[in-house]
Amino acid sequence: MRVLVLGGTRMLSKAVAAEVVGRGHDVVCAARGTSGLVPGGARLVRIDRNEPDAYAPLSGGWFDAVVDVAWMSYRWVTEALRALGDNAGHWTFVSSMNVYADKNTCGQGIDAPLVEPVRGEGDPGQQDPPDRYGGVKVASEMAVREAVGDRAFVLRSGLIVGPDDPTDRFGYWPARLSRGGRVVVPDVPDQLTQYVDVRDLASWVVDAAESRLVGTFDGACAPLPLGKLLGGVAAVVAPPGTELVPVAPKVLTEMGVSPWAGPNSLPLWLPAGCAGFTAHDVAPSLAAGLRIRPLADTVRAALADERRRGLDRPGVAGLTPTKENEVLSGLDGEPIFAPNG
């Protein structure tokens, strides 16, 4: 099988390329090549998707499968389809659960209402609307279905975690819990959460290409309570004596701690009104072949990646030691679960 990966130098696209190579297929990675190296055994064709006639070096060639992980550009998606769609046996487009309009209802599936499509590239001088990312993904999905619908595997990914994750939205927890001590956690143990290991998602993408799976699917593990997830992380990496100290969301907010992402945040804690964002029904995806590895495997890989990049580096998300000590000051919190429980 000859596979074209649009990308191949960063997280998911790199993991897909590595999986293709590992299965003995021929893989071409089309990228600028400035974000990193492609996996060993893959061939890099240098293209810049912002340039006119970007796909000329790939024209005329047949690919049994194309994988497009375009993050935010509707133009990138449509131009790739025009240039390559007729010469592709199968087309994977990686979308996002951000396409869903209702962020609060738990248990939704792929038929849930979507945000309005956004087809423009945006004005750099203006603030993007909150749903711009989801809207671009909706418009891109529509373009994919129109061009290659009978060959299209549209994968609405949840939070992708594991090796090479640049966001710290999952890796913060293995890194922080591995240090032990008193660990501030949001006091929302029953909040449902979802994630997907990048290696599992990559494996499913290649499975889909090999089997010609088509349709639209959500890509994430089954929802589980945040307290159970953090307990599972602690069980793998926390030293004896570690305490998880629950702090009420109202107190966290008053002390300048944000949910989900960004500086001085507690990752995986959802903003108000977003209870369903990480609580989708993924039973159809699991039935269609998505395999989720044990949490402990993902935790160990995430911690190894955090250590490789440096546990003391400034994080993109999470609490700094100074901020965490500020929150802990004066609190008499008790651990909500033992690290080995």
Image: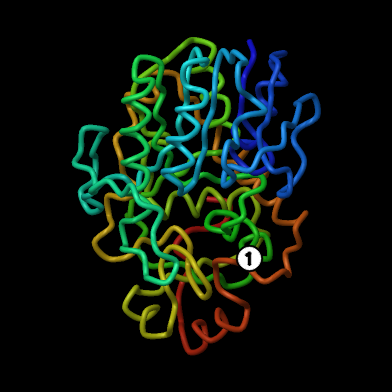
In the figure, 333 relative to 143: above or below? below
Which is nearer the eye, 19 or 200? 19
The x and y percentages for residue 92 are 47, 26
In the figure, 272 relative to 99: above or below? below
* Residue that mark 1 sits on: 241
The x and y percentages for residue 31 are 66, 39
Occupied quadrant, residue 253: bottom left
Q: Residue at x 35, y 51 (%)?
A: 120
Q: Residue at x 52, y 33 (%)?
A: 68
Which is nearer the eye, 321 or 169? 169
Q: Residue at x 46, y 44 (%)?
A: 195
The x and y percentages for residue 67 are 54, 28
Which is nearer the eye, 141 or 183? 141
**Residue lying furthest right in this view?**
40
Side (left or right) of 77 relative to 206: left
Number of dots carrying numbers = 1
**Residue lying furthest bottom in this view?**
330
Side (left or right) of 303 relative to 117: right
Q: Residue at x 59, y 60 (%)?
A: 172
Q: Quadrant of the N terminus?
A: top right
The x and y percentages for residue 108 are 23, 39
Tag 1: residue type? Gly
Tell me, what colour scheme is on the image?
rainbow
Side (left or right) of 190 relative to 34: left
The residue carrying pointer 1 sits among few (fewer than 14), some (14 to 19) or many (20 or more) residues within 10 Å by Cα, namely few
Which is nearer the eye, 341 or 127? 127
Q: Secondary structure at mark 1?
A: loop
